[in-house]
């Protein structure tokens, strides 16, 4: 049976068949009560990947915060890795771990889409983490890191700043290597176009050489400050990956997507290797943390963090999907446009979202692994539509812009459902009264 042949009332029948397996949840604003509902799912998990169906829904941030708090306090998790740029997250990490503050030429999360992390819900979690870490020894504090690759400009500057402090002569050599990319620091998307137009040579040899040179000096540099070397090395990797990424954007959508998710997964692995007792929580969109092999994107040749985590960690990786039917969301009309509070359309009758809406349970958690009820997994294993809203939401063309086919029980291990949700609260561009200059969300 194809999606076009599905009848609306099929969602009712499926909902009736799985309703008993949908565990009602409290409001995620009650962090402790909400978080403990996930204890039976943790088992021997070493990596817990927490998704979101949109980049601008308050309940998704609150739920991830509640689950993560429980994982930290009761299950020994000590790394939080988010779908954000490394330099922005580095400033937050210095704040929450009470580390030495450096001079920054920009605040955290001020570029599009600033509301994705610069919102009241995430700020509340950051404040809790700062307080939680305060009484712990430095080596035991929970770190917060960024996985993404969109920081070419700030990462390049960070490498040069680090070398200028620790090895001024090598800083001069690094400036020569990075000179190829200097004209494109502020507008990296134009780099590939310039190559295709014949006005720019590829910078890959130079940026790779710089990364190799930095890594070759690890013993000497890390001896001075291992944390600072980790930061510099990661920024050098980002410069090299970003150079490749922007070239790939003009060749194939799959190439650029796969390059980005491969980088994010490898960053996660490096963080875990750096910390022997590592247990990590990942915050990213469903499209990154669900198993891509169970979705249209995977069938089209794309992979993601979730699929790579499943291969690398097996049962030690827990993939948690999120969904909603309707409400409001913070999103833009198009890339690089201002944020708006938009109304989310009710879900389509042929979607997984409609199935969970028809259970009539406002908030629920469902085991999709079949460990509690094999029949539930089998009932949900027929392909259906699933909705994904990123930083751009186009409700007028929602079917074509935001829906894709998936097999939910193969995509996620469990599914977190909110029938109606509201938009995140973007932070105003002002420093709250009384906070210090080191406050990571100040302007």
Image: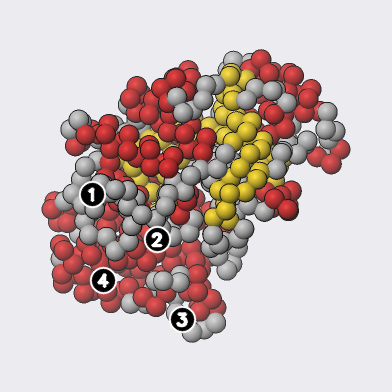
Q: Is residue 77 left or right of residue 22?
A: left
Q: CA distance from mark 3 to mark 1?
A: 44 Å
Please identify the quadrant where the N terminus is shown. Answer: top right
Residue count near mark 1 (Cα–Cα under 10 Å), binned few <14, some 14–19, many ≥20: few
Residue 213 in view: no
Q: CA distance from mark 2 to mark 4?
A: 18 Å
Residue count near mark 4 (Cα–Cα under 10 Å), binned few <14, some 14–19, many ≥20: many
* Residue with the mark numbered 4: 174
Residue 227 is situated, as x and y percent measured from the top left of the image, at: 22, 48
Q: Residue at x 69, y 29 (%)?
A: 357
Residue 420 is situated, as x and y percent measured from the top left of the image, at: 63, 33
Q: CA distance from mark 2 to mark 3?
A: 21 Å
* Residue with the mark numbered 2: 151
Disc 3 to disc 4: CB gap under 8 Å: no
* Residue with the mark numbered 3: 200
Q: Earlier in the sequence, mark 3 or mark 4?
A: 4
Q: CA distance from mark 3 to mark 4?
A: 19 Å
Residue count near mark 3 (Cα–Cα under 10 Å), binned few <14, some 14–19, many ≥20: some
Using the image, determine if residue 286 lies above or below residue 168.
Answer: above
């Amino acid at each position: 049976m194809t999606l076009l042949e599905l009848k609306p009332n099929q969602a009712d029948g499926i909902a009736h068949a799985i309703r008993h397996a949908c565990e009602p949840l409290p409001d995620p604003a009650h962090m402790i009560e909400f978080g403990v509902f996930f204890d039976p799912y943790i088992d021997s998990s070493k990596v817990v990947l927490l998704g979101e169906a949109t980049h601008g829904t308050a309940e998704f941030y609150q739920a991830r915060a509640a689950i993560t708090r429980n994982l930290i306090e009761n299950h020994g998790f000590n790394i939080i890795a988010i779908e954000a740029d490394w330099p922005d997250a580095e400033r937050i990490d210095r704040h929450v771990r009470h580390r030495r503050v450096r001079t920054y030429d920009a605040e955290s999360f001020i570029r599009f889409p600033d509301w994705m992390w610069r919102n009241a819900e995430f700020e509340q979690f950051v404040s809790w983490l700062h307080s939680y870490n305060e009484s712990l020894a430095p080596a035991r504090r929970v770190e917060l890191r960024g996985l993404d690759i969109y920081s070419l400009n700030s990462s390049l500057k960070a490498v040069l700043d680090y070398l200028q402090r620790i090895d001024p002569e090598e800083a001069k050599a690094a400036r020569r290597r990075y000179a190829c990319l200097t004209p494109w620091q502020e507008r990296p998307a134009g780099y590939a176009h310039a190559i295709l137009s014949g006005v720019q040579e590829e910078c890959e040899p130079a940026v790779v050489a710089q990364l190799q040179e930095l890594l070759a000096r690890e013993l000497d540099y890390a001896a001075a400050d291992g944390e600072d070397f980790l930061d510099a090395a990661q920024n050098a990797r980002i410069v090299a990956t970003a150079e490749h990424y922007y070239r790939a954007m003009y060749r194939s959508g799959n190439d650029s997507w796969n390059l980005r998710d491969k980088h994010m997964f490898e960053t996660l692995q490096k963080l875990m290797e750096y910390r022997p007792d590592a247990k990590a929580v990942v915050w990213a969109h469903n499209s990154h943390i669900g198993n891509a092999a169970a979705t249209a994107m995977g069938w089209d040749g794309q992979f993601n963090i979730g699929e790579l985590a499943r291969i690398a960690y097996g049962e030690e990786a827990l993939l948690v999907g999120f969904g909603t039917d309707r409400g409001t969301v913070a999103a833009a009309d198009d890339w690089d446009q201002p944020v708006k509070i938009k109304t989310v359309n009710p879900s389509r009758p042929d979607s997984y979202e409609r199935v969970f809406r028809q259970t009539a349970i406002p908030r629920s958690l469902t085991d999709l692994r079949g460990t509690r009820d094999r029949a539930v997994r089998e009932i949900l294993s027929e392909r259906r539509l699933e909705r994904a809203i990123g930083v751009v939401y186009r409700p007028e063309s929602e079917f074509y812009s935001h829906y894709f086919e998936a097999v939910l029980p193969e995509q996620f291990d469990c599914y977190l459902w909110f029938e109606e949700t509201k938009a995140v609260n973007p932070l105003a561009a002002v420093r709250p009264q009384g906070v210090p200059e080191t406050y990571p969300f100040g302007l």
